[in-house]
Amino acid sequence: MLTETATATIEPAFEIDNFHVTDSDLPAFVDMPFENINELHLDHPGANDPEYRKRRDYIASLAKKFRETGVVTDVNYTDEEQGIWQIVAGHLDELHAKRANKFYLQAKKDLGISNDHIPQLTEMNRRLKELTGFRLAPVEGLVDTRAFLSWLSYRTMLSTQYIRHHSRPEYTPEPDIVHEAIGHIPMFTNPDFADFSQFIGHGARMATDKQIEELGRLYWFTVEFGLTEENGDIKAYGAGLLSSYGELEYAFGDKVERKPFDLEEVINTSYDYSDMQPVLFVIPSYSELKEVTRRYIERIAR
Ligand SMILES: [Fe+2]
């Protein structure tokens, strides 16, 4: 009589601390869906400006070149582009003094991000490498959620280099260098925030489609629109807030419900990216956010 011998396969539980990523693990950019991501929608302020479109195409060609060579090319920004930066950065700086979190304010100084000129991704990469090992890879537009978030797993954020249209310096319907350099980049110098971002990236690589939607919400209500407690006060750390005059003022007004951060609630709260955010979540600290996210991602892995 044959006896069935079951070979028990004992899968070790997924633990984020055992999940190491090296440069040799980096997937090829060519595997990602990059087609037509620099197309402008008709309601974009620069959609009917042939000069702007030509310039966008040129800057897009630099991002494409990066995918072939792995080398980030500095953009030789024009005086007009520098002028847009100076207007927006100067105005945001005034609002940040009151609304931005303390870590961010110091990080912006440490990174040498000033109101005078647009910082280059190469400059930012040198500093980020020393501080948290995060890095920026140029991209010419919005990529899909799974692809974008997955790159965070390699401590890499895909970053645009072009700037918004001069006709509306206060507004952009899409990420641009103001959003990246003033909104996102300083926070990546915080070790807990950098780890937390990477955990989202690990999750995106393992997630089902439903879980990608949840991770997208977690990203939205933290990395983009997060608020944090700070000495009994509430401050902004999300890039969507820190890079937009309108959103930053609105976030602290009467029309917005500011709720304590609850991961389950966050991943189940839908949002409308084209409108002001009616609900925002306040984290107690970046280390707490990191730990809650660690447990959530380990759950996704099971
Ligand atoms: Fe963003």
Image (tube, rainbow, N blue to C red):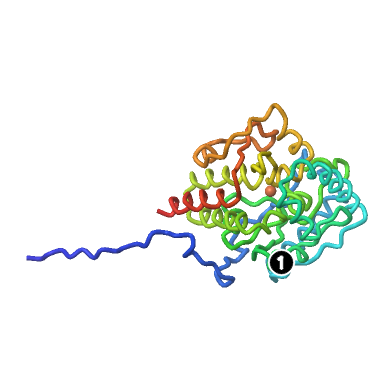
Residue 32 in view (yes/no): yes
The image quarter containing residue 228 is top right
**Closer to us: 180 or 249:** 249
Give residue 8's position: percent from left, percent from top: 25, 63
> Please, what secondary structure does the residue beneath circle 1 have?
helix
Q: What count of labels does the image hold?
A: 1
**Closer to us: 298 or 253:** 253
Neighbour class for label 1 at 10 Å: few (<14), some, many (≥20)?
Answer: some
Q: Residue at x 79, y 50 (%)?
A: 178
Q: Residue at x 60, y 66 (%)?
A: 28
Residue type at the position of mark 1: Phe
Q: Is residue 93 left or right of residue 175?
A: right
Give residue 182's position: percent from left, percent from top: 77, 51
Q: Is residue 94 left or right of residue 262?
A: right
Where is 229 relative to 176, above or below?
Answer: above
Give residue 112's position: percent from left, percent from top: 81, 60
Residue 226 in view (yes/no): no
